[in-house]
Amino acid sequence: MTTKSAAAAARATVYGHPRQGRDRELKKAIEGYWKGRVTADALRATAAELRRTHWRQLAGAGVHEVPTGDFSYYDHVLDTSVMVGAIPARHREAVAADALDGYFAMARGTQDVAPLEMTKWFDTNYHYLVPELGPDTVFSADSSKQVGELKEALALGPAARPVLVGPVTYLLLAKPAPGVASDFDPLTLLDRLLPVYAEVLADLRAAGAAWVQLDEPALVQDRTPADLNAAARAYRDLGALTDRPKLLVASYFDRLGDALPVLAKAPVEGLALDFTGPAAANLDGLAAVGGLPGKRLVAGVVDGRNIWVNDLEKSLTTLGTLLGLADRVDVSASCSLLHVPLDATAEKDVDPQILRWLSFAKQKTAEITTLARGLSQGTDAIAGELAANRAALASRAASPITRNPAVRARAEAVTGTDARRSQPYAERAAAQRSHLGLPLLPTTTIGSFPQTGELRAARADLRAGRIDTAGYEERIRAEIQEVVAYQEKAGVDVLVHGEPERNDMVQYFAEQLDGYLATRHGWVQSYGTRYVRPPILAGDIARPEPMTVRWISYAQSLTAKPVKGMLTGPVTMLAWSFVRDDQPLGETARQVALALRDEVGDLEAAGTSVIQVDEPALRETLPLRAADRAAYLDWATEAFRLATGGVRPDTQIHTHMCYAEFGDVVQAIDDLDADVISLEAARSHMQVARELAAHGYPREAGPGVWDIHSPRVPSAEEAVALLRTGLEAIPAERLWVNPDCGLKTRGWPETRASLENLVAAARTVREELSGA
C-alpha cells in the first residue's frame, strides 16, 4: 500500500460547500430582505457568519485549503457576470442605484424589467442565470466580492483558494442578448474577456491568494475544434501572465476527452479532475497524455453529487495509481458539495442501519480528509476508518431493504406493448376533443397553486401533533375548494386541485412509495432561495396504495370542468432524488414507471379524463456526452410510456418540462407520445415553440406565457404578444395557454393578477382568430 514517503504532500480540499446554513439561515435572511423585514446590513452579517462557520468547520475537519468565492446570495454564474461587468442594459440603472437590489433584479426581475433567463447547470438540478452577451458587450473587472471573501477566510487562519467560473465555460454558457442575432457566438468575446480575468487574478494575488481555481466544466461536453482552440488560447494567455497566483483548472461531471490533452499542455500549475462515474475514464486519459509531470493534480474521488458512503479502499487504489501521474496528488470530492445536504447525522428519524450508508457534505469532508491521510501516511493510519467503511458497504449490499423479488419479477415481465398507447395520436386527439369539449387555445395551469404560510403551518402542526389528521384534512379540503372556485371564476378551462397536500413534487410521492427514504433536514439548493429535500432511492420501488386519487376526485366533485390528475414522471422521480448506485438507472426507472402506471389507472377509473405526468428533468438528466445519450433516451422515454400507456384513447395525457435546452431532446419529447406538452418559454421568448415547429412536432403544446420564477405580474398584452409568436410556430388548434411552471412559490395576489391576464390574453387571441 501507499507509503508515507510516496505521498507526503497529499492534502485535502473541496471545491465548494452548501450555502444555506444548518437551518437555512441564508434563505430566511434573503427572503426577509425582499419583504423588508431584514436590512441589507443584517443580510450581509448573516452571510458573513455562514461563510466563517463553513470555513471553520472545513478547517477543523482537516481540510488544508478551503474554497472562497463559492458562496452566493443567488447564483455563482450571476456572480461571475457581476465580476466581469456583464450587466444587461435593462438592469444597469438598478445596479448603479443599489448593487444588492440590482443583483436581485437580475435574478428575479421587477414589475417593469424582466430577469435573466434561468436554466439547469449541466445535468444537475441546480439552476443558473444565463449571461446575456452581444458584439457590443464591454467587460470590466469588479473583484470586490472575490477579494473580500478571500480576505475573510485568510483572517481565520486556513489556506484559502478562490474558486471562479472559468472564462471559457462562462462564454459557452452565455446566450445572445435580446435584440442580438441568434447566431451570435459569445465565444468570440474571449479576447475581450481574458484581460478582465487577468485583472481579477492580479487582485486576488495582491489579496493573498497562492492558488486560484478556474472551473471549466463545459469542457467535459462534446466540444468543437474551435472550442478546444479557445480553451488552449485562454490558458496560454492566462498562464503567461506574470502577476497572478498559481492556476488550478477544474472540470467535473464527466470525462474531459479531447479537452484533457489541451489542459494538460497548458502553462498552468494544476488540474482538478473528476474520477467518479463516467469521469473515471479520466484516469486512462491522464495516462494516455503522459500524466501531469511537475504539476498538481486534485483528484475528485469522492462523489460530490450523491449521498452514499465512499468505497475508501477503491478510492485509495485510484489515488495510488494517480501518484505516478503527477508531481503532487491532493484529494477532493468530484465537484462542489453544493449538490448534497449538510449533515446526515441531523436525520434522527432515519433507521440507523441506513444512516451508516449515507454521506452528506460533512461526512464527505471526513472521507476526503481520511483518504488524504491514508495516501500520505499509509493505510495503517486509517485502519479504523477502513474497517468501519467495509462494514457499512457490506451492510448495504446484504440488506433486504434493497431487493423486492415481486417488484423485480414484474419489471422483467414488461413487454414493448405495455409501453404503447392502444391508438395513434390522430385517433386519440379526435376522441379527446369530443370527450372534453375544450375551446380553441384552452387555458390551464401546470398544477400547483401558492403554498401559503398557513398550509405549511398546518403540515407542521400535524407533524407536531398540534392538530389531528381530521383537522388537517379539513384544511386541505377548504384550500382545494378555494382553488377550484377561483379557477372557475377566472375562466380557466382545465382546472387543477392546487396540490395543497403536497410538500414537494417528488418528496410527496417518495413518502408513499416503498423503497424510498425521505429526509427531514436534507435541503439542497435548486435556485436562489428555493431549496428542496431530494428523497433517497434506497431499494426496489412499489406502490402500496393509491397516492393522489382521493384529492383529485374530491376536486372533480366540485366542478363540471375537467380537473387534471397530477403526477411526477419516472425520470424526474430519479433526477430529483439521490439515486441508488448499485444498479443501472434504467432498471430503477422501470420500477418507478410501473408504480405510476398503477396510479394512472386508478385515476382514470375514478373518472379523471386529463392526467399530467410531469417530466421537467428529462433534459437535465441527458448525459453530457452525445455517445451516451441514445441509451439514456431509450429507457427514459420507455419509462414515461410505460407509466402512461395503459389508458383509454379519450383520456388525455399531458406532460410538462421547464428550464432546459429543449432543442437537445426534441425527438425524445416526440417519443414520449404525450397528447399535450407544456414547456417553459417566457424567458426564452418562445424559443421552444420554434424548436418544436422545426422538428415537425405533431401534437398539442403549451409554451408558457408567464414566467412564474419572477414575482412580476406580466400584462395581458405581454401574454398576447407571446401567444402571437407561438402561433407563428404552432397551429391554433394545437396551442394551449399556460404558465411556465407551477405556482407553488408565488403569492396569491400576483397569482390572481397574472392568471387573470393569461385568461384575458387567450380570450383576445381567440377573438382575433375568429375575426370577431
Image: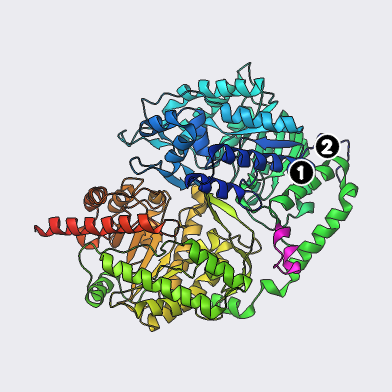
Q: Tell me if 274 is positioned left or right of 429 in this view.
A: right
Q: Is residue 686 above or below residue 473?
A: above
What's the distance in space between the residues labelled 1 and 2, CA to CA? 10 Å
Q: Which residue is tagged 1?
A: 319
Mark 1–mark 2 CB contact (< 8 Å):
yes
Instruction: Point out residue 410 in the picture as x, y percentages from the top left corner.
Output: 55, 79
Question: What residue span does the magenta drawing correspond to?
Answer: 344-356
The mark nearer the N terminus, 1 or 2, is 2
Q: Which residue is tagged 2?
A: 7
Q: In this view, does 129 lie above or below 487?
A: above
Mark 1: which amino acid? Answer: Leu
Residue lying furthest bottom: 605
Where disc 1 sits, the SS reads helix
Please name the residue shown 43% across and 26% down the image: 189
Q: Does the magenta stretch include residue 348?
A: yes
Q: Tell me if 179 is positioned left or right of 549 in this view.
A: left
Crowd band around label 1 with a 10 angstrom C-alpha radius: few (<14), some (14–19), many (20+): many
Q: Tell me if 241 is positioned left or right of 734 in this view.
A: right
Please name the residue shown 22% across and 53% down the image: 727
Q: Is residue 687 above or below residue 657?
A: above
Residue lying furthest right: 380
Where disc 2 sits, the SS reads loop
Instruction: Point out residue 522 in the picture as x, y percentages from the top left corner.
Output: 63, 58
| Closest to the observer, 271 or 724 | 724
Mark 2: which amino acid? Answer: Ala
Please name the residue shown 76% across and 50% down the image: 367
| Closest to the observer, 320 or 163 | 163
Q: Is residue 153 in view?
A: yes
Which quadrant is the C terminus positioned in? Answer: bottom left
